[in-house]
Image (spheres, grey):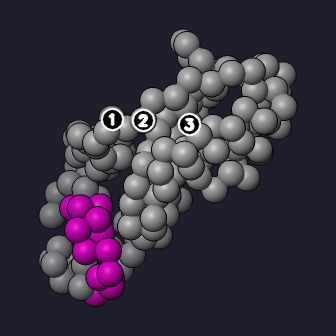
Amino acid sequence: MTVRRTEKNGLDDLDRKVLHLIRERPRSGLLELARLLGVARGTVQARLDRMIADGVITDFGPNLSPVALGYPVQAFTTLEVEQVSRAGISAALSAIPEVLEAHIVTGPGDVWCRVAGRDHEHIQEVIDQTLAIPGVRRSSTVITLSTVVPHRVQPLADLG
Protein backbone atom coordinates (compact mmCIF):
# COMPACT_ATOMS: atom_id res chain seq x y z
CA MET A 1 0.00 0.00 0.00
CA THR A 2 1.34 3.43 -0.95
CA VAL A 3 1.15 5.99 1.85
CA ARG A 4 0.31 9.48 0.62
CA ARG A 5 0.32 12.31 3.16
CA THR A 6 -0.97 15.69 2.17
CA GLU A 7 0.83 18.85 3.17
CA LYS A 8 -2.52 20.46 3.89
CA ASN A 9 -3.56 18.38 6.88
CA GLY A 10 -0.91 15.69 7.41
CA LEU A 11 -3.38 12.87 6.76
CA ASP A 12 -3.07 10.17 4.16
CA ASP A 13 -5.80 8.00 2.64
CA LEU A 14 -5.51 5.33 5.36
CA ASP A 15 -5.77 7.97 8.09
CA ARG A 16 -8.98 9.27 6.51
CA LYS A 17 -10.38 5.75 6.24
CA VAL A 18 -9.60 5.13 9.92
CA LEU A 19 -11.34 8.39 10.86
CA HIS A 20 -14.41 7.53 8.79
CA LEU A 21 -14.66 4.08 10.35
CA ILE A 22 -14.37 5.25 13.94
CA ARG A 23 -17.09 7.86 13.25
CA GLU A 24 -19.35 5.32 11.50
CA ARG A 25 -18.64 2.46 13.96
CA PRO A 26 -17.52 4.06 17.23
CA ARG A 27 -17.96 0.85 19.20
CA SER A 28 -15.70 -1.24 16.96
CA GLY A 29 -12.48 -2.53 18.43
CA LEU A 30 -9.05 -2.33 16.86
CA LEU A 31 -9.24 -5.85 15.41
CA GLU A 32 -12.55 -5.09 13.73
CA LEU A 33 -11.24 -1.82 12.31
CA ALA A 34 -8.09 -3.56 11.06
CA ARG A 35 -10.17 -6.31 9.42
CA LEU A 36 -12.42 -3.77 7.69
CA LEU A 37 -9.42 -1.78 6.47
CA GLY A 38 -7.39 -4.83 5.46
CA VAL A 39 -4.37 -3.84 7.56
CA ALA A 40 -2.69 -5.10 10.72
CA ARG A 41 -4.10 -4.21 14.15
CA GLY A 42 -0.77 -2.57 15.00
CA THR A 43 -1.10 -0.30 11.97
CA VAL A 44 -4.50 0.95 13.12
CA GLN A 45 -3.18 1.42 16.67
CA ALA A 46 -0.16 3.37 15.40
CA ARG A 47 -2.36 5.59 13.23
CA LEU A 48 -4.73 6.30 16.12
CA ASP A 49 -1.85 6.98 18.51
CA ARG A 50 -0.26 9.42 16.06
CA MET A 51 -3.53 11.24 15.35
CA ILE A 52 -4.16 11.54 19.10
CA ALA A 53 -0.63 12.84 19.72
CA ASP A 54 -1.00 15.32 16.83
CA GLY A 55 -4.31 16.58 18.25
CA VAL A 56 -6.32 15.43 15.21
CA ILE A 57 -8.45 13.16 17.41
CA THR A 58 -9.51 15.09 20.50
CA ASP A 59 -11.73 12.54 22.26
CA PHE A 60 -13.57 9.25 21.99
CA GLY A 61 -16.53 10.22 24.13
CA PRO A 62 -20.10 9.83 22.95
CA ASN A 63 -21.79 12.82 21.34
CA LEU A 64 -24.77 13.77 23.47
CA SER A 65 -28.06 15.24 22.27
CA PRO A 66 -29.29 18.27 24.23
CA VAL A 67 -32.80 17.53 22.90
CA ALA A 68 -32.76 13.94 24.20
CA LEU A 69 -31.46 15.24 27.55
CA GLY A 70 -34.48 17.53 27.87
CA TYR A 71 -33.04 20.77 26.43
CA PRO A 72 -34.77 21.17 23.06
CA VAL A 73 -34.33 24.95 22.71
CA GLN A 74 -30.97 26.27 21.59
CA ALA A 75 -29.85 29.85 21.15
CA PHE A 76 -26.78 31.85 20.27
CA THR A 77 -26.05 34.77 22.51
CA THR A 78 -23.46 37.44 21.86
CA LEU A 79 -21.90 39.03 24.93
CA GLU A 80 -20.27 42.43 25.00
CA VAL A 81 -17.59 42.25 27.71
CA GLU A 82 -14.92 44.36 29.34
CA GLN A 83 -11.68 43.21 27.71
CA VAL A 84 -9.75 42.99 30.99
CA SER A 85 -12.32 40.50 32.34
CA ARG A 86 -12.02 37.73 29.74
CA ALA A 87 -10.39 35.10 32.00
CA GLY A 88 -12.96 35.59 34.75
CA ILE A 89 -15.80 35.61 32.23
CA SER A 90 -14.54 32.38 30.67
CA ALA A 91 -14.47 30.66 34.06
CA ALA A 92 -17.96 31.94 34.93
CA LEU A 93 -19.38 30.79 31.58
CA SER A 94 -17.82 27.34 32.10
CA ALA A 95 -19.72 27.08 35.39
CA ILE A 96 -23.11 27.42 33.63
CA PRO A 97 -24.08 23.90 32.43
CA GLU A 98 -26.45 25.23 29.75
CA VAL A 99 -23.56 27.03 27.99
CA LEU A 100 -22.57 24.41 25.43
CA GLU A 101 -19.69 26.38 23.96
CA ALA A 102 -18.28 29.90 23.97
CA HIS A 103 -15.89 31.64 21.60
CA ILE A 104 -14.07 34.96 21.68
CA VAL A 105 -14.78 36.54 18.30
CA THR A 106 -13.91 39.51 16.15
CA GLY A 107 -16.53 41.90 14.85
CA PRO A 108 -19.77 42.72 16.66
CA GLY A 109 -19.79 41.38 20.19
CA ASP A 110 -16.89 39.87 22.06
CA VAL A 111 -18.03 36.38 23.07
CA TRP A 112 -20.49 34.16 21.23
CA CYS A 113 -22.13 31.39 23.23
CA ARG A 114 -24.32 28.48 22.18
CA VAL A 115 -26.76 27.72 24.97
CA ALA A 116 -29.48 25.13 25.53
CA GLY A 117 -32.65 25.28 27.59
CA ARG A 118 -35.81 23.38 28.40
CA ASP A 119 -37.97 26.19 26.98
CA HIS A 120 -37.79 29.88 26.13
CA GLU A 121 -38.13 30.90 29.77
CA HIS A 122 -35.18 28.71 30.66
CA ILE A 123 -33.13 30.35 27.90
CA GLN A 124 -34.00 33.70 29.49
CA GLU A 125 -32.72 32.41 32.85
CA VAL A 126 -29.46 31.34 31.22
CA ILE A 127 -29.09 34.76 29.59
CA ASP A 128 -29.77 36.39 32.96
CA GLN A 129 -27.00 34.25 34.48
CA THR A 130 -24.55 35.40 31.81
CA LEU A 131 -25.54 39.04 32.34
CA ALA A 132 -24.86 38.68 36.07
CA ILE A 133 -21.20 37.81 35.38
CA PRO A 134 -18.93 40.71 36.36
CA GLY A 135 -17.52 42.29 33.21
CA VAL A 136 -20.45 41.36 30.94
CA ARG A 137 -22.07 44.57 29.76
CA ARG A 138 -24.93 43.38 27.56
CA SER A 139 -26.10 40.54 25.37
CA SER A 140 -27.96 39.90 22.15
CA THR A 141 -29.61 36.53 21.59
CA VAL A 142 -31.17 34.63 18.70
CA ILE A 143 -33.15 31.40 19.10
CA THR A 144 -32.38 28.57 16.69
CA LEU A 145 -35.32 27.25 14.68
CA SER A 146 -33.62 24.24 13.11
CA THR A 147 -30.18 22.88 12.35
CA VAL A 148 -29.31 22.74 8.67
CA VAL A 149 -25.66 21.65 9.13
CA PRO A 150 -24.79 20.05 12.48
CA HIS A 151 -21.33 20.49 14.03
CA ARG A 152 -18.90 18.51 11.93
CA VAL A 153 -15.19 18.29 11.28
CA GLN A 154 -14.83 15.17 9.12
CA PRO A 155 -15.15 17.13 5.81
CA LEU A 156 -11.99 19.04 6.72
CA ALA A 157 -10.10 15.77 7.13
CA ASP A 158 -11.43 14.67 3.75
CA LEU A 159 -9.84 17.64 1.97
CA GLY A 160 -6.85 15.75 0.78
| Marks 1 and 2, how far apart at CA | 36 Å
- Residue under circle 1? 8
Q: Is residue 116 left or right of residue 68?
A: right
SS for callout 3: strand
Q: Is residue 4 left or right of residue 99?
A: left
Label 1 is placed on what type of residue? Lys
Please tell me which residue is depicted at 52% across the width and 28% down the height of the picture: 141
Please tell me which residue is depicted at 68% across the width and 51% down the height of the picture: 96
- Residue under circle 2? 143
* Residue 47 percent location from the top left of the image: 37, 66
Label 3 is placed on what type of residue? Cys
- Residue under circle 3? 113
Q: Quadrant of the C terminus?
A: top left
* Residue 100 percent location from the top left of the image: 54, 49
Residue 51 seen in render = no
* Residue 76 percent location from the top left of the image: 49, 34
- Disc 3 residue crowd, few under 14, some 14–19, many 20+, Cα 10 Å: many
Q: Is residue 17 above or below residue 136?
A: below
Sequence-first tag of 3 and 2: 3
Please tell me which residue is depicted at 77% across the width and 44% down the height of the picture: 92
- Image-quadrant location for residue 106: top right
What range of the chain is rendered magenta?
17-31
* Residue 155 percent location from the top left of the image: 25, 44
